Image: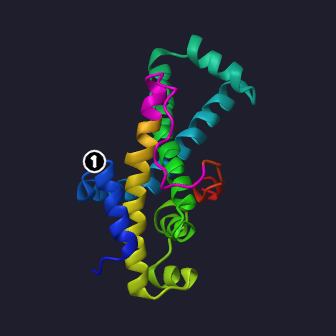
Amino acid sequence: MRVTRTMRNISLMYEGMNLDEEQVFHKSKLLLDIYRDVVWKTLKEVEYIKDVCESYYSNDLNAALTYLSDFAPSEQRADFKDRVSYIFETSWMIELIDTAMIKIYDYPVHGKLYHEILSKCYINSNTLNEHELLECLMMERTSFYVRKKEAIKLFGVALWGYALPKYKSVLTNNFGEEDNNSFFKKEDKIQTQCELSAY
């Protein structure tokens, strides 16, 4: 595969952040590959918890949660707790990917295109085959695969170089640090395809 100027610039970002480009690329691809299933499973768990709560106490969620916490049999409470824990454990992943996708959208060279490629290939609930993707993006097959690889590599920079360190600093109460990654041009949040897709 040819090495584009954008790919060289992305490689320089990896070097500047001391990230192993190939390792991060493969981790990024794996994470994107499982994302759709994780979101689907999380939404199914949310629906289950909502149904359980409604079956105990009508539509009053607070009352139902109180009932499950205080009065439900221990086995039922344990199952409920496990399901709620799963939702909270996976919600951080969804938020991190949303943050990375926002950074990709804001990237000055092909950012919107990269965002759209990743959204259509990995994020949106409906899957498209190769022909539909190429038609939707109005791209030739070779160009698509070059841009897709660039998008995944940029996603790795956005996630491991920006989003994870940002959330780590929040978790360690290190609120004074500024974002030093000047290759992204703005911080404004946009509504991502992740938030728009209806599961």
Residue 190 in picture, x, y percent from top left: 66, 53
Secondary structure character of the magenta stretch overall: loop
Q: Is residue 112 magenta?
A: no
Residue 33 in picture, x, y percent from top left: 38, 59
Q: Which residue lies under the disc numbered 1? A: 18
Which amino acid type corresponds to the residue marked 1 in the rendered image? Asn
User: Left or right: 198 with respect to 82?
Assistant: right
Residue 75 in picture, x, y percent from top left: 44, 20
Q: Nearer the viewer, residue 97 or 88?
A: 97
User: Left or right: 172 with respect to 186?
Assistant: left
Q: Nearer the viewer, residue 48 or 165?
A: 165
Residue 121 in picture, x, y percent from top left: 47, 68
**Image point 50% across, 41% down: which residue?**
179
Q: Nearer the viewer, residue 192 or 2?
A: 2
Above-or-below relation of 174 to 107: above
Q: How many marks?
A: 1
**Image point 55% across, 16% down: which residue?**
72
Above-or-below relation of 139 to 50: below
**Image point 51% across, 69% down: which residue?**
109
Q: Which residues are magenta?
A: 167-186
View extreme (bottom): residue? 140
Residue 71 appears anywhere in the view: no
**Image point 50% across, 68% down: which residue?**
114
Residue 94 appears anywhere in the view: yes
